[in-house]
Structure formats: structure tokens, C-alpha cells
Amino acid sequence: MNTIIYGLDIAKHMCQLYWVEPDTGEIMNRRFTREELIKFLVNRMPGRVALEACGSSHWWARKIRTLGHEAVLLHAKFIRPFVQTNKTDAADAHAIWTAVQQPGMRTVAVKSEEQQAALSLHRVRTLLLKVRTMQVNQLRGLLYEFGATFRAGRVAGLKEIQTRMQELESTLPGTLIICLHEQLARIDRLQQDIDQIEARIAVWQKQDQACRAIADVPGIGKLTATALVATIGDAKTFKSGREFAAFLGLVPRQNGTGGKVRMGSISKRGDPYLRTLLIHGARSVMYHSKEPTSWQQEIQARRPANVVAVAIAAKIARTAWAILARGQAYQRDFVSVKPA
């Protein structure tokens, strides 16, 4: 007997489920509340439930698995071509049901609660960094309106403001001085929050075995290690390291017709945050590596710096995938061999 397949379109309050009854061939496209859907799936025979990788999809996938079904997450761009009519919940559920049955359809790895929590810390930290930058830039702009300029750089600029505080208090209006002290205190609180989040990230890195395994790879620090492990989910979802690098947008974009394929700049698909961390780590390897490999030396000799940084970042991603997917320890001089 074939496994029954469900196409599930989720939302905050209502969900649409599409399936075909295996015994009668009857097409079903029903609307459920969250609670009704869970009760319905509890009483059904184990099947394969496909849903779009969107908000709360990882929670739904974990919940569906606890109910005895197989959960499959699909990227939204792979579902959209199968929407035959206007975009509605019913049409989306049908499209998901159709897409999951296509040969070679790529899926998204389901993240664990710990991985989602780690990514949440990264997202909060990113927002706090943006707010801190905005606060510092605004402070510089306000003081510049009164002719006060400071050294470039956040740390150097704030330090100079503190050093010249007596001078500023004697030349600037009292109202602005009060605002200046409040702004400096606000920036200091933001920095404390960022430090606390980074400390929690460091604790998770030390506790997680996968993070410790890839920490030895040059160019991977605590932020990159935790973000990579949390983003990749199950490494075995990807067939190869190059597929993982393509998932992160670190491989060239291809454009071909008439049998000729042209390679362009990197595709920039996937998570831009993790891609940025990997490229920053690659730049650190470029400029601070004490013993660069022969491959790195060769590519640095013939390619521009930005191209080299992306190439090293892709190599770091592929190395991390091999360690996570195969359970191997990092070996600096390891040479891969193509299977026959």
C-alpha cells in the first residue's frame, strides 16, 4: 500500500490540507483550525505531510513527527510554479501536494528546538548591532551640527567623546548635553545586551558537539560555528559540500542556452547572515593565516581579493559540511579522493 501524501498550507489560525483518499480516490481539500488539524492527524494512518518552509513550519514539522507522520519542508520558490490558479489557501495546499511528488525535489532540513533557539540569539544580536550603529551615527550627526567632529570608528569615536566631555559641556547647550548623556547610556546598555547574548552563544557552542567539531576549521569562530550548525539542520540533507555551498549562495550563477553555459558572479541565495560570517572568516584566513595552504597561495596569486575571499568561504563551508555529514574530525592536510 502506498503512503498517503498530504499537502499542508499553514497560517497563524487556519490551515488547509489537501490529500487523495487511497481507497476511494476521493480528492479532499479541507480547512482546519490548529487544534482540529492536530486531532485529525492523530487519528490518521502514518503518512507524508509536506508543507512550505515558512513561519512556524519547523515547529509544525516537529509536531507532525510526534504524531507519527513524516514531515517534509519545501522551499517556497519550488512550490509557486505548481499554483495553477489564483493564489488561495486551497490552491497552495494543492501545489504543495503536487510539488512534493516531483522526482528530485529538494527539501529543507527540519531544525531542532536548540538550533532554532541559537538562531534566535543571532537574530536578536544582529538587530541590536543595527540599533547600536544607528544610535552612534545619530549621535555623531547631532554633534556635527554644532561643529564637533570625532575620530572614525565606533570605539575610537565614543572614547573621544568621553575624553572631550568637559569641552563639550562648556560649548554646547545644556539641553543637548542632557540628551548626549542619555544617548551614551543607551549605547552602553545596548553593548551590555550584545555581550550577554554573545556569552550565551559561546555557552551553546561549548555544549554542542557539532559546534565543537567544526571549531578547528580555520575561519570558523563561535559566531560562525553556531550559526552554521543551527542553519544547516541535518547536514545529510545535502548530497555534497558543493550543494551546501550552493544553498548558501557561494557558487557562481549559471546562465546557459544553446549548449553553452556562462558562469557569473555568486548567486547570493540562502541566508545572507551566514554567508557574511563565512566571508569575514575567509578574509581573516587570507590576511592572518600563519601557514597558508598551497591552494590558497595559488588562488591568491592569480585572482582578486574579493574573489579569493568567496572561494575560501566556499571551501570553509564544504569542509564544515564534510565534518558534520561524515562525523570526521578536521584534518588540515586532508586530500579528498573522487569516488570511481
Image (cartoon, rainbow, N blue to C red):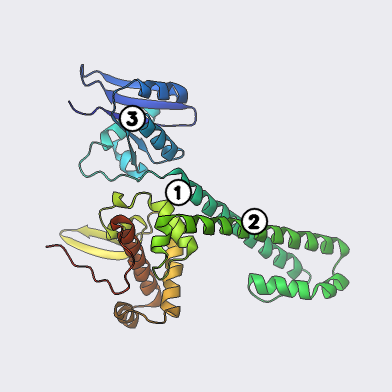
Using the image as rendered, state which of residue 295 and residue 81 is in the foreground. 295
Q: Position of residue 186 (x, y in %)?
A: 72, 58
Q: Which residue is label 3 attached to?
A: 68
The numbered mark, 2 or 1, whose residue comes first in the sequence reads: 1
Q: Which residue is mark 2?
A: 193
Left or right, 292 with reference to 35: left
Residue 251 in the image, given as x and y percentages of width and height: 31, 62
Q: Name which residue type carries label 2.
A: Asp
In the rendered view, tell whether residue 234 sits above or below residue 29: below
Q: Between residue 139 and residue 57, name the one nearer to us.
A: 57
Real-space CA distance between mark 2 and mark 3, rounded to the nearest whole angstrom: 41 Å
Of the residues shown, which amino acid type is indicated by label 1? Answer: Gln
Residue farthest along the left direction in this orientation: 340
* Numbered disc 1: secondary structure: helix
Picture disc at residue 12: none
Q: Label 2 to label 1, Cα distance in Å? A: 21 Å
Q: Is residue 30 left or right of residue 336?
A: right
- Residue 339 lies, in percent from the top left, at 15, 62
Residue at 49% x, 27% y: name it.
Answer: 13
- Image marks 2 and 1: residues in contact by CB distance under 8 Å: no
How many residues crowd mark 1 within 10 Å: few (<14), some (14–19), many (20+)? many
Seen at 42% across and 79% down, the residue is 289
Quadrant where the N terminus is found in the figure = top left
Task: Indicate the secondary structure of the residue bearing disc 2.
Answer: helix
Label 3 neighbour load within 10 Å: few <14, some 14-19, many 20+: some
Residue lying farthest top?
24
Residue 216 position (above or below residue 86): below
Residue 113 horizontal/vertical position (percent): 46, 43
Q: Tag 3, which secondary structure? A: loop
Residue indicated by mark 1: 115
